[in-house]
Amino acid sequence: MERSPPPVGSGVLGRNADRIRRILSDGAAAPPPSEPKLRQVERAPTPPAHEVEAVKLDDELRARLEALGVHTASSTPRPGRHALHGEPPARPEQPLPPGLLLHPPAEVFDWAEAPSPGTRQAPAALAGLVEASERETEHGSFLQVERRIPLTARHGGVVLGSALDHDIALRAHERGPCRRTSLDPRDAVFIDTETTGLAGGTGTVAFLVGAGWVEGDTFLVRQYFMRDYPDEGALLAALAADLGDRPLVSFNGRSFDWPLLTTRWQMHRSKQPRRAHLDLLPSARRLWSSTLHSHSLAVLERHVLHLERGEELPGYLIPSAWFDFLRSGWGGTIAQAFRHNEIDVVSMLALFARVGTILQDPIHGVGAHGDRPGTAKLLMDLDQPERARHCLEAGLGTCDPDGAPFDERPLRRLLGHLCRRAADHEQALEHWQAVARAGSFDEEAYEHVAKIYEHRLKEPAQALTWTESALEQLVEGTRGYEAFAHRAARLRRRLVRANGPS
């Protein structure tokens, strides 16, 4: 029996057609009467008051959450509370340290009340806070801030002009296409970025770039700021024009800041020339490897530059402050990022001065006895083994402020290697013997003493004596024991061939 097709509007086909019409008409069409209704689910009854009270957070945890800006069920936000960062930063009660001569200090910021959620302020208010001007380019405009800091000013315990007294030698991978062997700070640009994240990739943007260079008797710090994403092309074009092909100085910039900027230039179909690039972070890790638990710029400022920032906005809050600025237009928090970035740039110049002072006079420039091995390693990286040797020898026989002698083993180990490379085998033997006789058993020292006696001084009997002494202190069956046992057997055969069976 032949069946007729179902009428339009009935069955599954009809319901789908009606649904498509409602979607295309933005919900103007009413649902067909035959469409089944959703089953209503009854709301769960409200639990008794004593059960609600039992699951509330305790006072201590609630206080910690409120300090992080998280509102608990029983807490009420204060009027004017900022959406991300709590209250707007208050003016510091204590004045900034006298050595921190940066303008404008935090207390001159006119902190206005944060806008209520859902409202937006004009970004022009930020320009007034940080004394910025709008810079026009063929790609658009962005905000630019300029500070001129006299080279006679002190940044913590460092006079900025002292950076001009020393050039810093460059390692092979830092020299760039010109193959310059050293870097004069007058030729360099000190650069630092504030970005939307640390992950890198095409989605990460440098919304604030600080660049500083010596100009006359001042250190000019110029900051480039994106008010929104469309400003990026203008910012990058102006930054490229100001940089030219001058060499760079950064702090962790070879691994993060410069690759990020290079990626953004490539996305805007621009290419930067290769140039010399000195990264101060590896040098800091070498110089203060033994005396500092961390080598972040903040730790180096405190312990090497003797600088206390006195700022309110930590670096990890800067990305969220910029996103909040995009949403609300309120510049109270992001204005502090300008100060943070400015101090970073000036701190690199001061750190350049400290590194240059140590490398110029490694004998007297090293601040602590424990920093001598790291300083010597940096000099070895720079292919200056003689100066590394002098730096280490100056630390022998010294005492700490209490009169107790320092542990010389780290210094003598490096001296042993340096003397061996210089073919000064007598001195190398002296240093390795001193390491072997000081303190606990040192397998490496015994091995080097035996090698020098056997291969350099041609005294196999002495080499066998030191080898057998090492075997007495090693555990049988270990890899070290087997190596020394093999050496001892070879030395005995050599002595038998040279002296006969007796």
Image (cartoon, rainbow, N blue to C red):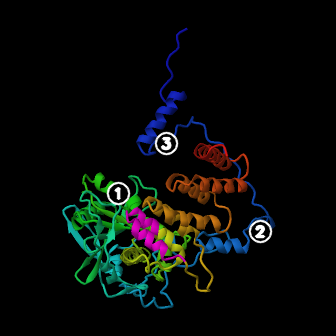
Give the mark toward the camera: 3 or 2: 2
User: Which quarter of the rendered picture does the N terminus lie within?
Assistant: top right
Image location of residue 22, percent across then percent down: 45, 41
Of mark 1 and mark 3, the one earlier in the sequence is 3
* Residue identified by numbered label 1: 173
* Sequence-wise first label, 3 or 2: 3
Instruction: Look at label 3 and name its amino acid.
Output: Ala
Residue 86 visible in the displayed image: no
Instruction: Report the disc number at residue 369.
Output: none
Answer left or right for 341 relative to 412: left
**What percent of the width, then of the height, locates residue 171?**
35, 61
Nearest the viewer among 185 and 89 is 185
Nearer to us: label 1 or label 3: 1
Mark 1 Cα within 10 Å, few/some/many (few <14, many 20+)?
few
Report crowding for label 2: few under 14, some 14 to 19, many 20 or more residues within 10 A (C-alpha): few
* Residue 108: percent from left, percent from top: 39, 87
| Residue pointed to by mark 3 | 30
Viewer-proximal residue, 307 or 364? 364
Q: Secondary structure at mark 3?
A: loop
The amino acid on which the numbered mark 2 sits, given as a three-letter code, is Glu
Q: Please give the residue where the numbered disc 2 appears in the rendered image.
A: 53
**497, above or below 147, in the image:** above
How far is the residue under mark 2 from the one under mark 1?
64 Å
| 3D distance between C-alphas at marks 3 and 2 | 46 Å
Q: Of callouts 2 and 1, which one flags the residue occurring earlier in the amino acid sequence? A: 2
Q: Amino acid at mark 1?
A: His
Dot 1 falls on a residue whose secondary structure is: helix
Image position, residue 26 (x, y; %):
43, 45
Q: Is residue 186 visible?
A: yes
In this orientation, which residue lies closer to the viewer: 267 or 139? 267
Which numbered mark, 2 or 1, is in the foreground of this view?
Answer: 1
